[in-house]
Image: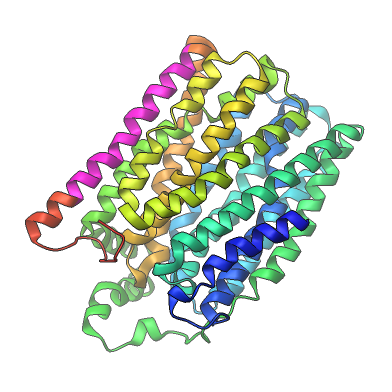
Amino acid sequence: MTYLRRLYSRITSRLHADSYGEPQFSRDQRNIRINIYHGIANIVSLNLAAPFIGIYAIKIGASDFQVGLLSSGPALFSLLSMIPGGKYIDRKSNQKQILSRLIFLHRLFYFLISLTPFFTEDKRAWLLVSAVALMNMPGSVFNVGWQAYISKIIPASKRADAFAARNKLMNLTGSIVVLLAGRIIDAVKPPVGYQVVFAASFVMALVEIWVFNQIDEDKPEPDVSLNRASPEVENSHGDAKAAGNRLGMVNSTLHNLRQIMQNGAFVRFTLASLVFHFAWQTPWPLFTLYQVKQLGANNTWVSLLSLANTAGSLIGYGFWARMLNQHGNLKTLFTSSIWIFIVPAAYAFSKSLTTIAFFNVLTGAIFAGVNLALFNSLLEVTPEESKATFIGYYTTVINASAIVAPMFGVTLYNLLGFFWAFIVCAGMRIAGSFMFFAVNCLERRIAADSGQRVLPARRHHM
């Protein structure tokens, strides 16, 4: 704990630097600190349960198909909820209250999962798959709403450092939690260990909600966005919300789609991200199957692999935050994502969990850049007035991929075996990362032809 406090002090001291030109404890800085605390509470709650869902499914007799559904099922339910959820949140002024309720509903499912051992053996796996799928309805709407909400709380000029600091401490804390939870599960007679950590995840969510509600925001002004007099805002965004009320969901959706298609930067980024995510998501279920069935991983090993990943990310986030500030989002996104082929390639040639743990250190540093650049790129290409709606459409497209990609990965495994399935996935990931290279080149050409920046002009963006 002493090390954690020292690390937190070093990270947050950068956020309090005088270079921002603000008092040390301004509201922005306080919100940045609370956002970090919220991230820590969030990852403690999630990592008490989420890393062990796959191995728990196998332990209770889930088939390969059901393991694949643990990735595809949540994506399907997210697909159904994110667009209406994003539009709903965009219309509301009490967004923090809504997001708090969504956290509660999402984490309540972990408590329900802790009850699955009380059912007969033939029902347990399907109950688990169903719960994991359903919990992503509130979970996905929260993610959409949180991204839009926090972009209003933390200024764009501070996001790279603020989220790098948040992610560093989240990863470090999360890995310690995974390690402890894994030891608890293995030390206690099954399935009691699983039940304990799943129930604890729900309890920790109550702490997370309390921390999240400490964020200091402007008092909400209901319906201002629907009644403001600015013609530009009314024409481009206000009418979209009014249309949803007057003409119903169909016409509102058509209006949103027309609005989205007029935002070329958003469309290009979404298409590139779709291809990239399909390649990224394809081997997900294969990793769990290979770890458990081929290499004999237990819960402690799952924890150690997570800890190795975190060790790399602690180095990576600082490096990639500097890259973002110097070179912009898309270039950083390509530079980091081009290396994620290493993960399936390492699995193809690895015969021991120790080897995978070694590569997890490297891939942790790489994924720090991917996660940071993806998040910042998305915020950059979404308009402020309809951010939750745009993020909802974006995430819906990505989750459409997540429905198909994991099942495609299982199919590759059934046809080719683990080795060639991983090799194919590695090639797909290289191809997917080049989509961001293409978009970056295209945006630069468009900017040069028009004589101005296509994306919002900021010092560190291309």
Of helix, strand and loop, which mostly describes the magenta segment?
A: helix
In the rendered view, tell whether residue 77 sits above or below residue 379: above
Outermost residue on the top side: it is: 416
* Quadrant of residue 285 within the rendered picture: top right
Which span of residues is magenta-colored? 420-443
Quarter-of-image position of residue 375? bottom left
Between 410 and 269, the residue placed more toward the observer is: 269
Quarter of the figure with the C terminus: bottom left
Across and down, in percent, residue 291 comes to 66, 22
| Point 56% across, 60% down: residue | 142
In screen coordinates, is 202 left or right of 149? right
**Most foreground residue, 136 or 458:** 458
Q: Is residue 332 above or below residue 387?
A: above
379 over 270 or under it: above or below: below
Q: Is residue 204 visible?
A: yes
Residue 437, magenta (yes or no)? yes
Q: Is residue 92 magenta?
A: no
Residue at (42% x, 44% y) in the render: 398
- Residue found 28% across the figure and 55% down from its top: 266
User: Is residue 395 something that shows in the picture?
Assistant: no
Residue 411 position in % (x across, y down):
49, 19
The x and y percentages for residue 50 are: 68, 43
Q: Is residue 445 above or below residue 432?
A: below
- Residue 429 is situated, as x and y percent measured from the top left of the image, at 39, 29
Q: Is residue 24 left or right of residue 101?
A: left
What's the residue at 85%, 32% (across, down)?
186
